[in-house]
Amino acid sequence: MNDLHGKHCIITGGAGSIGLAAAKLLRAQGARIALVDLDRAALEAAAARAFGAQTDGIALLAADVSREDEVERCVGDAVSRFGQISVLFSNAGNFGAVAPIETYPTDVFEQVWRVHVLGAFLTAKHAVPHMQSGGSIIITSSVAGTRGDPGVYGYITAKHAQTGLMRCLAKELAPRGIRVNTINPGPIDNAFQKRVEDGLGAEIGRDGTEFFNEIIPMHRHGTPEEIARSVLYLASDQSSFTTGIQLGVDGGMSA
Ligand SMILES: NC(=O)c1ccc[n+]([C@@H]2O[C@H](COP(=O)([O-])OP(=O)(O)OC[C@H]3O[C@@H](n4cnc5c(N)ncnc54)[C@H](O)[C@@H]3O)[C@@H](O)[C@H]2O)c1
């Protein structure tokens, strides 16, 4: 039931850690993959790392998910290359800043919302017309979409907003047989999270990674591959009656 032969997946943030891990796993199950990210050179380097010379079934599409013209163009390119879209993994993300409310930079707040919220909205808006019954949309939210923390205004509010988007889409698209869910990772052992933890560490005067390992009930970070396996579950027919949920993959952090 994990078989994805004949399926076509768009993955945004595809040059990044979680996006690329998901691309590898979904491709290994037979899906054809369109990787979308900001920069063509980064996409090429990521694809070379993940697939080497095995580029059959892989398309690389440079686009900024917060720009409607670019999203429309890249979805069109993906469809003309592979046909109908079976899976949209809407995963592009940035972190922004941590600062008290009085000094949180408004332009950073807007930039974070543009990527996570507007980006997820635009990719769904332009992909859905090319999706049919059996399709699946997965939005990468976060454990940060289930809780608050001081100063993380852009990221935490944007990750909560993705839940609202997912719920609207899930209700609208259920009668058409298209499922929509969020995946909510906890801290992952990758460069994105390391930057967050280095910033936190400087604020609290101790190692930010160790701090997270203490507060995660399983006392460790997740891996991009663990998130990819849950993406496969939501992408495949294994989850055929699952829509409108937040799937926590967080070592118990949201328990
Ligand atoms: N790393 C973690 O611990 C963690 C935990 C929970 C949720 N997440 C979420 O997982 C997703 C993937 O993050 P990651 O950990 O793989 O980090 P990453 O930085 O490796 O990947 C994010 C990718 O998104 C791309 N991107 C950023 N803005 C974009 C835009 N406007 N248009 C297109 N692409 C854009 C980046 O270039 C990058 O390749 C993000 O949404 C992030 O918020 C990460």
Image (cartoon, grey):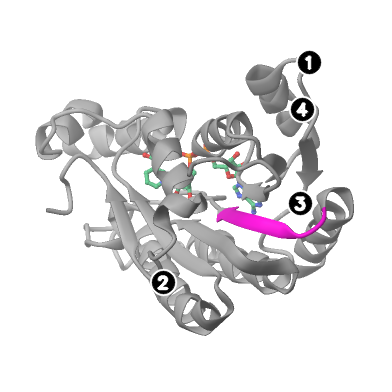
Asked if residue 106 shows in the view, the reply is no
Q: Which mark is residue 102?
A: none
Q: Secondary structure at mark 3?
A: loop
Mark 4 against mark 1, which lies toward the viewer? 1
Query: Disc 4 beta carbon < 8 A from ligand 1?
Result: no
Q: Nearer the viewer, residue 28 or 127?
A: 28
Q: Which residue is under mark 2?
A: 161
Does the CB distance between marks 3 and 2 fall below 8 Å?
no
Quadrant of the rendered image containing residue 219: top left
Q: Residue at x 71, y 58 (%)?
A: 85
Q: Which mark is residue 44?
A: 4
In the rendered structure, which disc, 1 or 2, sits on the residue that comes first in sequence? 1
Q: Which residue is under mark 3?
A: 63
Cα–Cα gap, marks 4 and 2? 31 Å
Query: Most extreme residue toward the right, as rendered?
Result: 80
In-image side of 218 versus 50 (left or right): left
Q: Which residues are magenta?
A: 83-89
Query: Disc 2 beta carbon < 8 A from ligand 1?
Result: no
**Callout 4 environment at 10 Å: few (<14), some (14 to 19), or many (20+)?**
some
Q: Which residue is under mark 1?
A: 53
**Callout 2 environment at 10 Å: few (<14), some (14 to 19), or many (20+)?**
some
The amino acid at mark 3 is Ala
